[in-house]
Amino acid sequence: MADVLIRDAGITWADVIAPETVQGELIDALHAENEELREKVHRLSVQKNELAQATRETVYLRRRRVKRFAALIIALLIAFVGFWLVSELFE
C-alpha cells in the first residue's frame, strides 16, 4: 500500500527516508547547473565583445576604403580638368 501511495505522489523511497540527503543532492545539482550557466554567460559575453570589436574594425576599414576611393576620384577629376585646360590652351 505504501509503495502505491509513494508512486502516485511522484516521489521515491529516498525522499521519504532521508529528505535532507535528497534535498542536499538537489541543492548541489542546482549549484552545479548555476555554475555552468554562469560560465556560458561569461563565454557569450566574451564572444559578444569580440564580435563588437570585429564590427568596429570592419566599419573602420570600409570607411578607409571609401575615403581612398573618393580621393582617387577627386585626383582623376583634377587630372582630367588639368588635361582639358592644357588642351584648351594649345587650341
Image: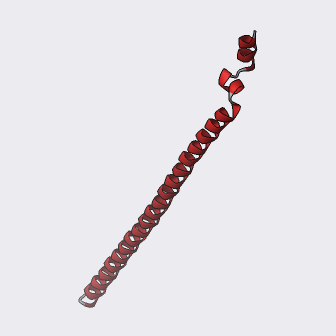
3 and 89: which one is in front?
Answer: 3
Screen quadrant of the C terminus: bottom left
Rendered image quadrant of residue 14: top right
Screen quadrant of the N terminus: top right
In-image side of 7 versus 76 (left or right): right
Residue beneath the point at 35% across and 78% down: 77
Q: In the displayed image of the protein, which residue is found farthest to the bottom?
A: 89
80 and 31: which one is in front?
Answer: 31
In-image side of 17 versus 40 (left or right): right
Please state the horizontal and vertical placement of residue 79, each as a whole percent of the image.
Answer: 29, 81
Q: In the displayed image of the protein, which residue is found farthest to the front?
A: 17
User: How many marks are shown on the rendered structure?
Assistant: 0
Q: State the colouring used for the structure image.
A: secondary structure
16 and 33: which one is in front?
Answer: 16
32 and 81: which one is in front?
Answer: 32
Residue beneath the point at 53% across and 46% down: 36
Please state the horizontal and vertical placement of residue 20, each as a whole percent of the image.
Answer: 69, 35
Q: Is residue 42 above or below residue 80?
A: above
Q: Is residue 40 above or below residue 6?
A: below
Q: Is residue 53 above or below residue 27?
A: below
Rendered image quadrant of residue 54: bottom left
Please state the horizontal and vertical placement of residue 70, each as a whole percent of the image.
Answer: 39, 74
Residue beneath the point at 49% across and 53% down: 43
Rendered image quadrant of residue 8: top right
Please state the horizontal and vertical placement of residue 82, each as a whole percent of the image.
Answer: 30, 85
Q: In the displayed image of the protein, which residue is found farthest to the left?
A: 90
